[in-house]
Amino acid sequence: MRILVIGGTWFLGRAVAERALARGWQVTTYNRGRSGNDVPGVEPLHGDRTVRNDLLQLAEHGPWDAVIDTSSSDLAPRDVLLATTILRDQVRRWVHISTVSVYEGWPHQALTDHSPLLDCPPDVDETYGYTGEDGSPTTYGFQKAGGERAVTEAFGDSAVFLRPGVILGPGEYVGRLPWWLGRAKRGGRFLAPAPASQRIQPVDVRDVAQFALHQAASTTSGGYNVTHLDGTSFEEFLSGCLAATGSTGAPVWVEPAVLKDHGIAQWTEIPLWRTHAGVWAVDSSRAVAAGLNCRPIAETIRDTWRWWAADGRPVDHPRWAEHGIAPEKEAKVLASL
């Protein structure tokens, strides 16, 4: 196999490139060369995927059996369309990393791979869409849905869409799991969102990478929800963080209404906490039947701590600062209970 990884220097893109090389595949990576280092053994090409001339130069290095696009999260649909249009004749198959945010019902409703998607044209700019008053749908979701449409226009039945919810694991740049690990390590009493039995479905970056490669070599098409089929309870998740860090910290389980009364932001100030009914009700059974294997989340926690303790975050990213409650605010809430 000869594949093109758009991205390829950090987190999911890096995990894809490393595992493709381990399979003996020829790997070309394409990015701007600004974030992270190229994986040893790849053919590194640098350029801006939103610039037509840069993409035309990239196409000269083809053909490839497949593209795995890990870097479209901040792109307008028209930018995705530009890349797919120029590369169409140089690529047999396109594996596109999307998101569960493309669904009309997320995060309020339980989802399957056949749930209806948000409607967004494939050729619009970054201003298309809106964010609802309750935080859904989101402009981001519309944009990603338009990106999927752009890939479909160019590749039809040779397009595959992987729709993760939350990806965790070594190399994470968003900072969700590293924040919880850091908080656990600090010890003492800390806020935890009740109920402790709430199931969550984060998936390991290495498992997403393996599934993306499996799809690159496959002949299937369409969308796959990529979430942990078994999941874990929030209590088990925090117990894993405490165990990994060797901490004696103690979670204090607080009801959502109390957290809201104190103005604590869901999803960011308490990472992975969100009260919407469908946020952790995403059916990934189709992906599992197609080859998705998810390791225990306790293993993801343990390996992330080993990476985090040894290396820290690999790339500065603005989303890192969004996650985690300030110690002073947490202490004030704990004192009021």
Image: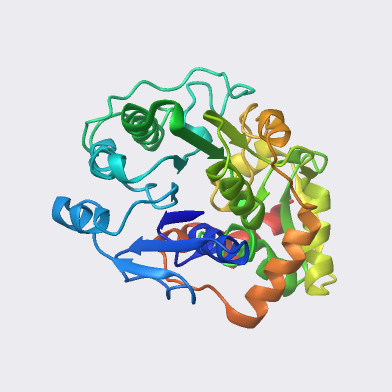
Q: Residue at x 49, y 77 (%)?
A: 40
Left/right of residue 23 with respect to residue 95 in the rendered view: right
For this orientation, the residue located farthest to the left is 53
Above or below 277: residue 174: below
Q: Residue 306: x percent and y percent?
A: 71, 75
The one nearer the camera, 210 or 112, is 210
Q: Residue at x 28, y 45 (%)?
A: 87
Q: Residue 16: x percent and y percent?
A: 54, 58
Count of residue discs: 0
- Mark yes or no: residue 209 visible: yes
Q: Residue 145: x percent and y percent?
A: 39, 30
Above or below 161: residue 336: below
Q: Residue at x 28, y 29 (%)?
A: 122
Determine the image quadrant of residue 230.
top right
Q: Residue at x 50, y 38 (%)?
A: 99
The one nearer the camera, 134 or 7, is 7
The one nearer the camera, 250 or 119, is 119
Q: Residue 270: x percent and y percent?
A: 61, 52
The one nearer the camera, 228 or 87, is 87
- Mark yes or no: residue 264 visible: no
Left/right of residue 10 with respect to residue 61 in the rendered view: right
Above or below 225: residue 60: below
Type of colouring: rainbow
For this orientation, the residue located farthest to the bottom is 310
